[in-house]
Amino acid sequence: MVETARVFIDGEAGTTGLGILARLEAVPEVTLVRVDDAHRKAPAARRAAMEAADVVVLCLPDAAARESVALADSLGNAAPKVLDSSTAYRVAPGWVYGFAELAPGQAERIAQARHVANPGCYPTGAISLLRPLVDAGVLPRDYPVTINAVSGYSGGGKSMIAAHERDGGPAFNLYGLNLEHKHVPETLEYSGLSRRPIFVPSVGHYRQGMLVSIPLHLDLLTGRPSGADLHALLAARYAGSDVVRVMEADPAAGMEPEALNHTDRLEIRVYANEARGQAVLVARLDNLGKGASGAAVQNLRLMLGLEAPAARALADA
C-alpha cells in the first residue's frame, strides 16, 4: 500500500480533471503533483511531473493522451501507472478496463494494472445492465440490442457547455445518427455481446445527469424470464457493491436523469409488463460522477492500494 500517493493530472483544467481534483480533496492519502499553468503543455515540465508521480491521470483528447502515454512509458523504471479518461485505450491490448463492477475479479485486475482505461459514461450504464444478463446466459450474445440514452450537456465538452450556457438550448437533441458513436466499441467489447448494438444518444438542456435504457422482449430471452427474475439476477450480481444499486421500479413515478447528480452512484431498475412480455432496463448515473470523475477516483484508489470508501455524495458547489 502506498503511504502517501503522488498523483499528476495531465489536463486538470477540463471538466473531468476538475471533478477529480474536487474529489481528491477528500482523500488525505493523495498528494497532487502540479505544473504551473504557464508550462502545463511543456514536455519537460510534464515529464518531470510524471517522474514524480505514482499515477498519472490523463484528462485529454485521444491524440494528446497517446502522446502522454508514450512520454510516461519512456521513463523506464521510473514510469508511473497511467489512468486514461479518453477513448484512446478502452479496447486496446494491455489495458485494463476501469469498470470495477464489470465482473468478479475486475477490481483486483485494476489494482494490479499499470495501464487502466476509465470507461465512457454511456457504456458504464449500458454495460452495467447487459453484462450480468449475458454472463448468466439469459440474454443471448447475438440479441439485437438497442440502447437509448440521454445526458446533460456537460458530457459534450467545453464547446457544448459554452453553447448551452450561452444560447440556452436546444431543449433536446438526438445525435450520433450515423450509428458510429465512439462509445460503441467498448460497449460491444465489455457487454459480452457478439452483435453490434444500435446506440441512440441524446443530450438535454440541463447540465448533468444521465439515463441509459434498454428495451427487451422477454420471450426472446433464454428461459423466458419475468421482470422479477431480471431484477433478482441484477440484484445478486451487485449485492456487494457500495456504488451500483438495484432499486425497485415504480412505473407510475417515471424516471428523471438528475436525481444522482453530485454523487458517484449508479442505480438500476427493471420495468416490466408481463402481460405484454416486455421490459425496459434503466441505469441512472451522473455523467460527471460514476460516468467520469467518480469512476476515475474509484480506480485511483484501487491502483494505489487505498481502501475504497462507500459511495458518497459530493456537496453541490
Image (cartoon, grey):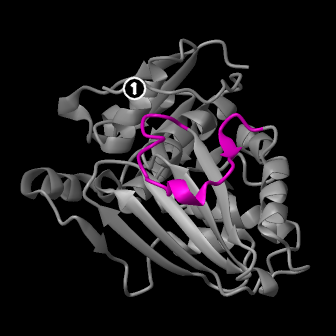
User: For residue 176, which quarter of the picture?
Assistant: bottom left
Say if the magenta span includes residue 258. Answer: yes
Looking at the rendered image, the quarter that the C terminus falls into is top left
Find residue 110 and report its image quarter.
top right
Query: Can you say whether 22 is above or below 196 in the image?
Result: above
Q: Quadrant of the N terminus?
A: top right
Question: Which residue is under mark 1?
Answer: 22
Q: Nearer the viewer, residue 60 or 227?
A: 227
Q: Can residue 148 be seen by looking at this rendering? A: yes
* Amino acid type for the residue under numbered disc 1: Ala
Magenta portion: prevailing SS class? loop
Question: What residue range appears in magenta?
Answer: 241-264
Q: Position of residue 230 (x, y in %)?
A: 79, 64
Horizontal side of 302 relative to 9 (left or right) equals right
Residue 309 is left or right of residue 275, and the answer is left
Between 219 and 65, the one lying in front of the other is 219
The relative height of residue 29 versus residue 314 in the rendered view (above or below) is: above
Q: Could you tell me residue 304's position as x and y percent?
A: 66, 28
Provide residue 92's location: percent of width, then percent of height.
62, 65
* Residue found at x 66% / y 26%: 310
Q: Residue at x 64, y 81 (%)?
A: 145
In this view, 151 is above or below 143: above
- On the image, the x and y values in percent for residue 307 come to 71, 22
Q: Counting other residues with Cα less than 10 Å from the Cα at mark 1, is it few (<14), some (14-19), or many (20 or more)?
A: some
Task: Determine if residue 47 is in view.
Answer: no
Looking at the rendered structure, the secondary structure element under dot 1 is: helix
